[in-house]
Image (tube, helix red, strand yellow):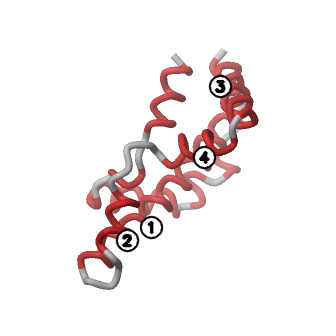
Amino acid sequence: RPQDFLQDLMALRAQAIPRDKLMRVVPLVQDTECLGPQAFQGANSQALRSLAAFIRATVECAEIYMEIRDSAAAGRFDLQQASQLLDGEDSDQRRMISAMGVVGAEAEENELQNLQNGYE
């Protein structure tokens, strides 16, 4: 179901993505032929482009979290600050939607509708 898939995307915590998995995904995200806008055609192309943008953003966030983790381990970043950034329970996406309030709820509902329309 599209709604379940959307909820899974909203719950994905970029800070929890293991380094080995991130390193396997980075080359795909950087490959413009793989996830570029021109790669998607047909009835579901807009939903796939949105998903590709989400994946790219999540990978970028995961890379930043990896840099924070590495800097903290090397003593270049305060451990308490690193812990606050890395150990949160909420995903970045959910925090952003919450910060946007009502507009975020409407955006989430619109995105859900777009995904559902793309699968019908």
What residue appears at the point 33 percent right and 51 percent down from the top-left corner?
16
What residue appears at the point 37 percent right and 71 percent down from the top-left corner?
68
Instruction: Give the residue type that dot 2 points to.
Output: Ile
Please give the residue where the numbered disc 2 appears in the rendered image: 68
- In the image, taking residue 3 as reference, residue 12 lies left or right, namely left
Mark 2 vs mark 3: which is more N-terminal? Answer: 2
Q: Name the mark nearer the viewer: 4 or 1.
A: 4
Residue 24's place in the image compared with 116, above or below, is: below
Report how far apart the C-alphas of labels 4 and 2 lie in the structure. Answer: 20 Å
Q: Which mark is residue 64?
A: 1
Report how far apart the C-alphas of labels 4 and 3 lie in the structure. Answer: 16 Å
Residue 12's place in the image compared with 25, above or below, is: above
Report how far apart the C-alphas of labels 4 and 1 lie in the structure. Answer: 17 Å
Report how far apart the C-alphas of labels 2 and 1 lie in the structure. Answer: 6 Å
Please give the residue where the numbered disc 4 appears in the rendered image: 96
- Residue 37 place in picture, x, y as percent: 69, 50
Instruction: Give the residue type that dot 1 points to.
Output: Ile
Under circle 2, the secondary element is: helix
Whether label 2 touches label 1, CB < 8 Å: yes
Mark 4 vs mark 1: which is more N-terminal? Answer: 1
- Residue 11 place in picture, x, y as percent: 45, 36
Instruction: Give the residue type that dot 4 points to.
Output: Met
Label 3 Cα crowd, 10 Å radius (few <14 / some 14-19 / many 20+) = some
What is the quadrant of residue 46 in the picture? top right
What is the quadrant of residue 104 in the picture? top right
Label 1 Cα crowd, 10 Å radius (few <14 / some 14-19 / many 20+) = some
Report how far apart the C-alphas of labels 3 and 1 lie in the structure. Answer: 28 Å
Instruction: Give the residue type that dot 3 points to.
Output: Leu
Whether label 2 touches label 3, CB < 8 Å: no
Q: Name the mark nearer the viewer: 4 or 3.
A: 4
What is the quadrant of residue 87 in the picture? bottom left
